[in-house]
Amino acid sequence: MSPDKMIRMANQIATFFKTQPGDDAPAKVAAHISDFWEPRMRAQLRDYAAAGGTGLDDIVIKAVPLV
């Protein structure tokens, strides 16, 4: 998938979990990505974050090691 689409999707997930109670948004984002993204998408996200993660929400950056 294009990096722009991946960034948008990941950031939308983070935005949703920011509105939920609790301070475990990164864990919830990681769980959602692990449950619903296919392995190639998860690998692309990990690689993108490792290369700097430009444009990714801070919560997504914190979630990546948990994916």
Image (tube, grey):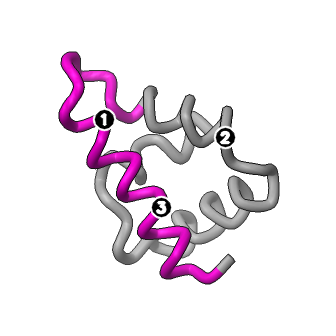
Q: Which quadrant is the N terminus positioned in?
A: bottom right
Residue 38 relative to residue 5: left or right: right
Q: What residue type is labelled 3?
A: Met
> Percent from the top left, x then y, of residue 6?
54, 69
Main SS of residues in magenta:
helix
How far apart in space, not on screen, are marks 3 and 2 (Cα)? 12 Å
Task: Please name the residue that numbered disc 2 is placed on.
Answer: 36
Residue 57 vs 7, above or below: the answer is: above
Say which quarter of the image contains residue 53: bottom left
Task: Please name the residue that numbered disc 3 is placed on.
Answer: 9
Q: What residue type is labelled 2?
A: Phe
Residue 52 vs 31, above or below: the answer is: below
> Percent from the top left, x then y, of residue 17?
31, 35
> Percent from the top left, x then y, of residue 12?
36, 55
Q: In the image, is residue 6 part of the stretch drawn in magenta?
A: yes
Residue 39 relative to residue 32: left or right: right
> Percent from the top left, x then y, of residue 55?
35, 74
Which of the labelled discs sits on residue 17, or is there none?
1
- Do residues under tags 2 and 1 come within 8 Å of each other at their CB atoms? no
Q: Which of 8 and 46 is in front in this view?
A: 8
